[in-house]
Image (cartoon, coloured by chain):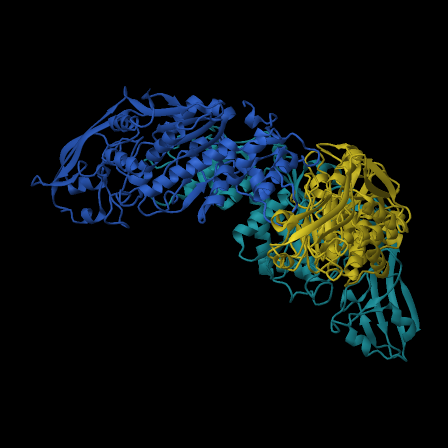
Chain colours: A blue, B cyan, C yellow
Amino acid sequence: MKKKLETYFDRLWPITRSLTGDGNRESLKILSEIIDLKLTEVPSGTACFDWEVPPEWNIKAAWIKDSNGQVIVDMAENNLHILGYSEAFNGKISFEELEPHLYTLPDQPELIPYMTSYYKRRWGFCLAHEQFLKLDTGETYEVYIDSSLDKNGSMTVGEAVIEGKSKQEILFSTYICHPSMANNELSGPLVMALIYIELRKQKNLKYTYRFLFAPETIGALYNLSVYGTHWKNNLKAGYVVNCVGDPGNFTYKKSRIGDSLADRTAAIVLKQTEADYEIIDFAPLGSDERQYCSPGFNLPVGSLMRTKHSTYPEYHTSADNKDFISFGAMQETVLKYLEMIQVLEWNSHYLNTLPYGEPQLGKRGLYPTLSKKGERAFVDAMMWILNLSDGEYDLIAISERSKIPIKELIPVVEILLKKKILQVSGNFKENDSL
Amino acid sequence: MKKKLETYFDRLWPITRSLTGDGNRESLKILSEIIDLKLTEVPSGTACFDWEVPPEWNIKAAWIKDSNGQVIVDMAENNLHILGYSEAFNGKISFEELEPHLYTLPDQPELIPYMTSYYKRRWGFCLAHEQFLKLDTGETYEVYIDSSLDKNGSMTVGEAVIEGKSKQEILFSTYICHPSMANNELSGPLVMALIYIELRKQKNLKYTYRFLFAPETIGALYNLSVYGTHWKNNLKAGYVVNCVGDPGNFTYKKSRIGDSLADRTAAIVLKQTEADYEIIDFAPLGSDERQYCSPGFNLPVGSLMRTKHSTYPEYHTSADNKDFISFGAMQETVLKYLEMIQVLEWNSHYLNTLPYGEPQLGKRGLYPTLSKKGERAFVDAMMWILNLSDGEYDLIAISERSKIPIKELIPVVEILLKKKILQVSGNFKENDSL
Amino acid sequence: MKKKLETYFDRLWPITRSLTGDGNRESLKILSEIIDLKLTEVPSGTACFDWEVPPEWNIKAAWIKDSNGQVIVDMAENNLHILGYSEAFNGKISFEELEPHLYTLPDQPELIPYMTSYYKRRWGFCLAHEQFLKLDTGETYEVYIDSSLDKNGSMTVGEAVIEGKSKQEILFSTYICHPSMANNELSGPLVMALIYIELRKQKNLKYTYRFLFAPETIGALYNLSVYGTHWKNNLKAGYVVNCVGDPGNFTYKKSRIGDSLADRTAAIVLKQTEADYEIIDFAPLGSDERQYCSPGFNLPVGSLMRTKHSTYPEYHTSADNKDFISFGAMQETVLKYLEMIQVLEWNSHYLNTLPYGEPQLGKRGLYPTLSKKGERAFVDAMMWILNLSDGEYDLIAISERSKIPIKELIPVVEILLKKKILQVSGNFKENDSL
């Protein structure tokens, strides 16, 4: 898994991605080799609630030369050098004219910032502040930006679905609009593709799993315009997958609801499997959870990350590169999401079919026929499941109340279902399609 | 403001107030110079639930002389010397006969206690215990009390109202029955008069503000007999204003409800503006909140005080005098109540009119058109307000969840209302008249 | 009380009790001398939900001799030596044949374990591990077990009832199936008998009190088959009484409901009367609360114990004997249960009949006619009771909110009821038969 992650990382890394354009198409096609992506072209100008899909942006080259023809800044070297969505420009200008088009990070002088101007027409270059300081203020510079903004273009989004027994859905959503940055964002699409590969191997899934790859904000708004109504009734849990490649501890950011199934699942898995982790409250700052959790939708969408976005200094700079991430950490993230999926699949409200007193377990071979002192983890798990399977507690709640890890409860549930002492409750909306 | 407080303090201080009588009338008339008080005379015998207004008490003089004609105790010197509601008496009596009529504080031997016998006929004098110990037990004393109890008299109460757009009300209530004591009680009427003066300057108030000045207990019961039914439907928040003149930290005593708008407003203002303060639970011990929060009414009435009543040693003694209080502290109290009023006025349930995803704020000039790292307090406040303006959260709740001070949210709300991205929700009873 | 406890302990101790049999009958007959027990014989084979009453087991003798005729193990010496429900056996067998029938505690080598095989036919002996190690492995042993299993027999259960004004019930339940063990279980029936004796002396009880003595599990299931439906509507609180004889601190195990009247009563009494105690959450592991709190019934049944069962090393061994227990501790337990009964009897939702403002207590002789500073515990208690008697708070809740011990509230409630300022609320299901 680590090898596959690195191979695809290296292929995707150099591509210039943005809200729209050929870089996005190429990236999604590469991912299509391992995940069955259906690609959709959404025409520029398409309304998505209060927004509309912007013109398609493509860029071939962008550089600054000094009067000696010496190349100063060139996006061929690092695609962060060009301000995202820069309009075309070609001309010789003085330093004074150039300066307002240059963006730097004075506090991180050796790094190139990542910046964009999606909805206001500008051109600009991003560069290290230490390079900026060395520029000759008396010089005349040649600026060349070969970009296009096409109102008849389109935005490209990708989608893969694994059908389960129910039309009720689990959503994984990631974004594909950042140029060469590793943790935010390449880790997201890569981890999501690997979750897909592993999950596709499983049979008899309860839920339908939807994997969405789209540019941040406008892509999520587009997907909400397509699926929002369906999700209001059918989305059981969703996760925005990004910033999952650094070796920091897991951070789970809750959905706006705060105790949704998405949140409870992430919380119980982290609590029962990780020594150090953090669970943070929802805030309408961050990534696409801002759209999924807007008040008109208020969907159960959280985000399992490693180190929280925008709290590490490499965020949105050229330092968010291959050195910053770990393919081992990415693999761990894939496996953690798979553990959460296992909990989602097994979590139900169960009914004890013999609820008056305890069932006589001995005659079913489930209870020692000889009383004796000592440990009995299986019997304890069975007793807790039977006692709380009244249709009010789901398996997560049973695990919380009994303090028995859900991983230890699942095989006991399996036996009790087989012995028909337990059945899945049909009274709960959450399972109404089962 | 401090000057005005002191001037009126000095004029009100020497007047002998009680449940009824000319001292109360005179006090309210002095206050009428600065607050538009409507005075009402409530006849003695008027039923107020389980109580009735007592006979009107007036007193001209009260003293004790020894057999040499030497004045021992004289209410002309300190009106605490006379037991409140003492009946008339004139005669020469032995020490043994006099002693049961003398009240002292053995634990605070240099102070005169404040005591009353409103509903049982007695006469008596209060004096310093150290003076009592010096009395000659073999002496004959002349006692003179020129008081009257008039069953055809009345109780005087005062009221001022500032009308707002809604008939829903905010109540400020204070009492006017204590003779010369400074923190409890002159600070109360003075602070309330100043709140009135400042508030009257404001335009377009949402709520109607009622200011009540009446003797403790029976006055509050009378006001409840008049307004109780109205308040059950229309009182949004109320505060008993007293013990607000000492320089101690603020203490807020909650209403019986515990999380009423009165309580939430006081709590958020104190939390966001004061370093040290205390919030204490309701108890049916104290002042007029006992009546407002009786189970038949259970009104949202709390009390913002400085040091909590009856916890300071000067309470109900001659030491509760001008030295004990601070006009600066009183002014701070006025300003703190005005901060609470600002929160009450702005607190509403708002509705985001573009609730599906985020509104595109950039095209409205509310969002930077250039993405960059860094601080953005205004944008954060806007995001939180928009995200939580679903009709379920009021502004206090938004401030609590976002941890952004309500003072910083208010100007952002103002802009969003103007841009019509936000509107006041009409679905909530609390705002139903708006 | 201590003397009576010890006398009956000594008489009951040597009797061999089990799920069924003459030992149980004899034990209940001895207890009938002090508590008016009605005995019922439940035929073997009687269905109790998923279970049925087992054949009646009786045993006259059981021993092992070596080839010299030397008695090695003899239940006449300690009735724990025989595995409960052992079938009859008579024969000479080698050590190899005997060994699988011998049960020991290698970790507690000097103690005889207590073990049973109720529902699977076996025979066996329990002995100290150190004795087992000394057995001659080359020896031939004579084994003699004179026991009978009668399918036409019966299970004996005992019951006593103290009728109150209401058919609503308080349940005390204990088990009577363990042979010679002191804390678990003889302390249970003894404490319960003494609670009965003390409670019978009280007049005008509000609730009906039911005392059940039956073998563990199958006895509770039988009682549920008889009373379960009645209890679902009428059981206010119940307690499983056992492990109440050791001198450890009190432990209260909550009902599955967690905040039932049974739980709240135990919690407030322990909090207000004990310095050190423990309240533990319900778990479906333990004794008959497993049946009472099964999901089909979910009754408000907890258990006040001393040291929690199965957490002390003497549990289910020959060391759980008279040395381990304290008759003083048992008496304390009786008294603690009686304190809980007092709270149950007084706990009601009361109504203040003068809820608009405070009643004028002075004219009823309940309030000092002279205002003065100082302590006033009675007035405070009265104020709290009046303020919270709105039909929403029961007396336990008033005690919790006011922080005034319920024992101090009860006499004030009594006075207020007499003065008719308070009445019992008729609006609450919990009191609907009063």
Tell me where residue B332 sits by quadrant: bottom right
Above or below B11: residue C350: above
Locate residue B341: give its quadrant: top right
Give percent across and percent down for residue B138: 90, 80
The front one of B275 and C14 is C14
Q: Residue at x 20, y 42 (%)?
A: A99
Instruction: Report the front residue among B416 and B295.
Output: B295
* B430 versus B26 height, above or below: above
B422 left or right of A245 in image:
right
Task: Name the spot of residue A45 as percent of width and height, x first.
Answer: 33, 21
Camera-nearest residue between C416 and B383 = C416
The x, y position of residue C228, in whole percent, is 77, 35
**Whole-percent x, y for residue C9 in the image:** 82, 56
Residue at left offset 88%, top offset 68%:
B144
> Where does the N terminus of chain C fall, quadrant-wise?
bottom right
Q: How many marks?
A: 0
Examine the image and state in which quarter residue A148 appears: top left
Residue B285 is at least partly visible in this image? no
Q: Where does the C terminus of chain C fall, quadrant-wise?
A: top right
The answer to whether residue C137 is visible is: yes
Left or right: residue C67 compared with residue B411: right
* Horizontal side, residue A179 vs residue B344: left or right: left
Residue lying furthest left: A68
Say which of A239 and C324 sits in front. C324
